[in-house]
Amino acid sequence: RVEASVPEAQREAWRKFSAKEFTTKDQFESEVVKHIETTLARSLFNCDEAAAYAGTALAFRDRLVIEWNRTQQRQTFADQKRVYYLSLEFLMGRALDNAMLNVQQKDVATAGLEDLGFRMEDIISQERDAALGNGGLGRLAACFLDSLATLNYPAWGYALRYRYGIFRQEIVDGYQVEVPDYWLDFNPWEFPRHDVTVDIQFYGEVRKYMDDAGKQISVWENGEVVTAVAYDAPIPGYGTKTTNNLRLWSSKASHGEFDFTKFNSGEYEASVADQQRAETISAVLYPNDSLDRGKELRLKQQYFWCAASLYDIVRRFKKSGKAWKDFSNQVAIQLNDTHPTLAIPELMRILIDQEGLEWDEAWSITQATFGYTNHTVLPEALEKWSVPLVQQLLPRHLQIIYDINLQFLQYVQRNFPKEREMLGRVSIIEESEPKRVRMAYLAVIGSHKVNGVAELHSDLIKTTIFRDFVKIYGPDKFTNVTNGITPRRWLHQANPRLSELIAAKLGGYDFLKDLNLLSKLEAFVDDKEFRKEFQEIKYANKVRLAKYTKDVHGISVNPNSLFDIQVKRMHEYKRQQLNIFGVIHRYLELKSMTPDQRKKVQPRVFFFGGKAAPGYWMAKMVIHLINQVGKVVNNDKEIGDVLKVVFLEDYNVSKAEMIVPASDISEHISTAGTEASGTSNMKFVLNGGLLIGTCDGANIEITREVGEDNIFLFGNLSEDVDDLRHQHFYGDYVLDPMLAAVFASIRSGTFGDAGQFSALVDSIVDHGDYYLVSDDFKSYVDTQKLIDETYKDQEVWLTKTITAVSRMGFFSSDRCIDEYAEMIWNVEPLPPQQNGA
Ligand code: PLP
């Protein structure tokens, strides 16, 4: 209904009884008690912390929903261009604390909960993480949603509503064990939209016929149909009423619950089989990070999600009554990595087969609509789908992909007639056995802009995987948007005391919306009171992590030690093995010292955390080695507090919020040229920790911003990597002698049966050391020594950390979103009006 068509009396009644937001403590308490007593059917006498969390979350959800409805109405009414961020992963973490802080009502809620007999920290910790992602890529998408809403961009996220998010990691006898994460038991943040459903087809065949005008028409038919149901989650901006939408699709059988005919004839299991088959599509998140898993189910997930999202986007566009030529003026779709690339042939299919557009018009609309963000140059992560599989599952899409390829190759041939060998290199179809569809090439060809996620990475994609495409399209199609992080979650929420201290110095919290204001902190670098408080906050955060380590892992660590942290997915390219070999080296050195010499060594705790993909046995071996080293070192009386090693189980976003503010040093030590950007590096520095890192990803820009004196760089450069690998290949190198001693110690059984780690050692000694651990080892150890020395002068250290924090403004994800909006999407913000309309 449009407003004008509703009689005034009705309008008045709606206005009068329209839902109101709580603004006072009493109103908040009344909402919480109402939800506990009616929605949850509990009372004062059986309200535990879980129920109090539920009541609080529901009170906040109601509040968000009011603004969310208004935002959607405003955006529909304004009818301007919207952004759709397609990401197979959104690593959101917890929602309650973020919602309270973004709507700026945490104080009210804290006081209200206290009245009702609860402590805010206990309530917040009741919430399960929404862990619909693996690592950096998914967390980036989550930070982007926060920035899009905060900056008032009309934007939606689209993903799948996995029943199981990333697995929970348990460490049993030093080994990773995966346990399912069934996170949906109670999720107050989502709204099922049973009225928003889309039927998605798979398999079947394509029939072609001529219409009356002699035009060839393709019909994809006789396939299996699965229904997508929308679940929406409100995304509140910070300090604005804009509340955007994250729409997650869940799969279910298209014909209802189960087959009654089968059930009635006694085929009980068969009667639910279809239902289960359909629901499998959105059942699990693939737990792979930077590894491609070419599985049919994964391809089904990708198409299911792309098709449902595009149907939704097109439906919304068509409601506006605009002509197709306006589509890309109304819609920008960003592809977060190649996972949503099928959206390109899907939009072509809609435009040509369903809407009757000619190829050329459909293609120019498609290209103008999509932008593609590349996240990796690692060959093992580049998605390629077997042609026979695509043929079977999506026969019409394969035809369209072949047509796109044909047109593209003809264009290349026309423009580069002398470079025939280029055609094979750039073809979307790889001539392997079986043939495969190169999704990254399809994404480049079908988008108007391609971006990398840090300067080095964006340069590297132009000279490696997309080199030919730069020649074909010119360099302007390729750009860089260096990743960023939301200061709301990663400073204000994770480190409230530091946020408060900064606000006290800068005269308010404006820096949370304009992170460049941090530069004003530099003026306080010599302010005694400020320095003292800054240091106390770091210490308190370390005490909190030390307490957690004792409570959960039973390991005592001294918060006066240097806290060295490496938390991120376990992967050979991220080189946790380099870190643990460094720890073993340190242990051997300590063992060779006299007690007096040992007393002079800077005490350190090495914290590790991160999940390995379940099938990635080398990464799992590194986890095992870390735990074995921890067992030996932590129980060595001679060593005591001088060295401790902790593996923090089940690293996730909510743990990151506790771990990140507790670091003195964090490790970002990937082989140069392999880490696209990294984002945890930014989080650590923003929270007053320094980095040890290679010249890789965003470490390079962090160095540019904070200054070379305020970061510890080491190792070979990306331009040397090829030569070094070559040397290994031809046996033209000598294993670093300190590393050789580390290996000798492992082989001698110091950390348990050496056979368990032989593949790891052999990969370096005998199999080419692809990640150049040996080449970087000395530089790494020397730099760690420098860190020990520097840390001894706490005043110098403090100056470095404060200076670094004050120079981190560039890394706000708000800056990223403004860059995407201007360079790639061409969208404008739509701020709420002053009167709230
Ligand atoms: N995993 C989690 C839970 C995170 O919070 C983050 C970033 O903060 C990452 C992974 C990405 O870490 P990195 O940038 O070190 O790869």
Image (cartoon, grey):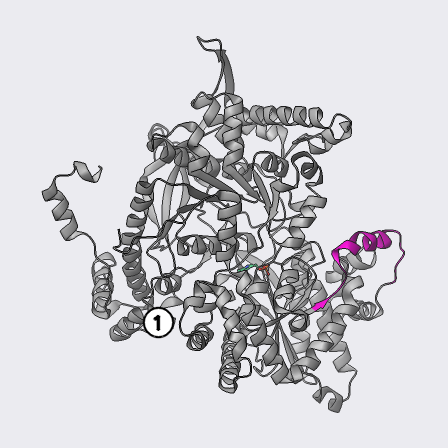
Task: Give the vertical position of 164 relative to 418 (above or below).
Answer: below
Left or right of residue 135: residue 18: left
Left or right of residue 106: residue 648: right
- Boundaries of the magenta span: 713-734
Confirm whether residue 135 shows in the render. Answer: no
Q: Nearer the viewer, residue 772 or 546?
A: 772
**Image spot of residue 199 (x, y percent):** 40, 31
**Image spot of residue 32 (x, y percent):** 25, 64
Q: Which of 378 and 717 is in front in this view?
A: 717
Task: Give the vertical position of 716 relative to 819 (above or below).
Answer: below
**Image spot of residue 382 (x, y percent):** 64, 43
Which residue matches tag 1? Answer: 120
Quadrant holding the N terminus? top left
Q: Nearer the viewer, residue 249 or 673?
A: 673
Q: Which of 683 and 226 is in front in this view?
A: 683
Secondary structure category for the residue under label 1: helix
Q: Quadrant of ligand 1?
A: bottom right
